[in-house]
Image (cartoon, helix red, strand yellow):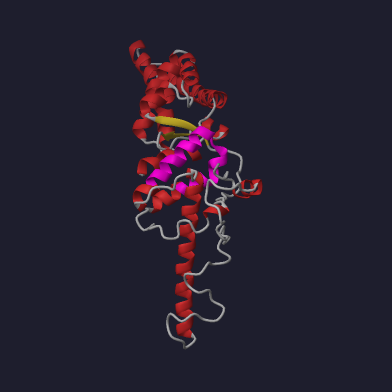
Amino acid sequence: MSELVTGEAVALELRPAKLPSRVLAVLLDLVVAFTAYLLVTVALTIASASLDEAAQMALSIASFLLVLVGAPIAVETLTHGRSLGKMAVGLRVVRDDGGPIRFRHALVRGGIGMIEILMTFGVIACIASLVSARGRRLGDVFAGTLVVRERVPAAPAGFVPPPPPWLAGRFATLDLSAVPDSLWLAIRQYLTRMRQLDPQVGQGMALRLAADVAERTGAPAPQGVPPAAYLAAVLQERQVREMRRAVASGAAAGGTQAGGRPGVPVAGMPVPGAPVPGVPGYAPTPAPASVPGQGAASPAEESSTGFAPPA
């Protein structure tokens, strides 16, 4: 599941940078780097006027490598992928799995960048970025990195759509104890963003998550139930159980403090095991007389829950 969580996190959270923004960031970095290189060159020329021509040439090559290659590598390493140009444009270099880069990543990117950017005036880098599906240049491919956007439009808070009414209470007896927290997190991330995904990509992710849940619960997903609706119903069942446990603990504590016997419900407290009103996203609905696949559900169900009823 770690691979799935990592992959989903990258796919859902990170947005690859477009070529124009990357070009602008590189141009800003080059302007700063060449300005610093000219200042260093002038200073070295004045300081090494008494040296012979071979020594001056060695100092010139060393300053070129240090300022135009070594300095960008050091900046990206210390800032975890944010050069001056990337800071201005709102970009960052990350690993393929979404983590921060280290020195070896910056070293590979900087070494190959000297060839594909400085020596070819960016022609190779632009061609590689256009060919790559995620806009990666050769340095990113060999380093295992990706340039992503940090400044994205603020999105509304994630909303987990409730399952359709015809799935109410369908998984009340399902054993969810073996489902890890990482899988619950992946399910919640998928449900909050499923409408933003490509339909084919979203369907594939739902199938994988549903298969993981079925494997850990030991019960396959019911026939005729869409994977996304199945995930929403299972996630809601877990939330309801957690709320019932919290209410039961509060009722036991309240009964003991009031002088009553532990386990005896206090007036005004819900009875453990009964439907819990007020649970976020939980609306107890009596199961319909017809089973999935028989009878037509109203279009309002799909608009209110986000899931289409089975045909």
Q: On the picture, is 180 further left or further right than 255?
A: left
Res 277 quadrant in image: bottom right
Residue 254 lies, in percent from the top left, at 49, 80
Q: On the picture, is 251 further left or further right than 2?
A: right
Position of residue 276 relative to residue 203, above or below, is below
Q: Main secondary structure of the magenta part?
A: helix
Residue 204 lies, in percent from the top left, at 45, 36
User: Does 200 lie within the magenta span?
Assistant: yes
Q: Give the range drawn in magenta.
A: 187-212
* Residue 268 visible in rendering: yes
Residue 78 lies, in percent from the top left, at 42, 38
The tally of labels here is 0
Question: Which residue is found at the position 44% from the left and 31% from the top?
Answer: 146
Res 120 quadrant in image: top left
Seen as rendered, the residue at the extreme bottom is: 259
Which quarter of the image is occupied by the C terminus? Answer: top right
Q: Which of 44 and 139 is in front in this view?
A: 139
Question: Which residue is found at the position 44% from the left and 40% from the top?
Answer: 207
Question: Which residue is found at the position 45% from the left and 60% from the top?
Answer: 172
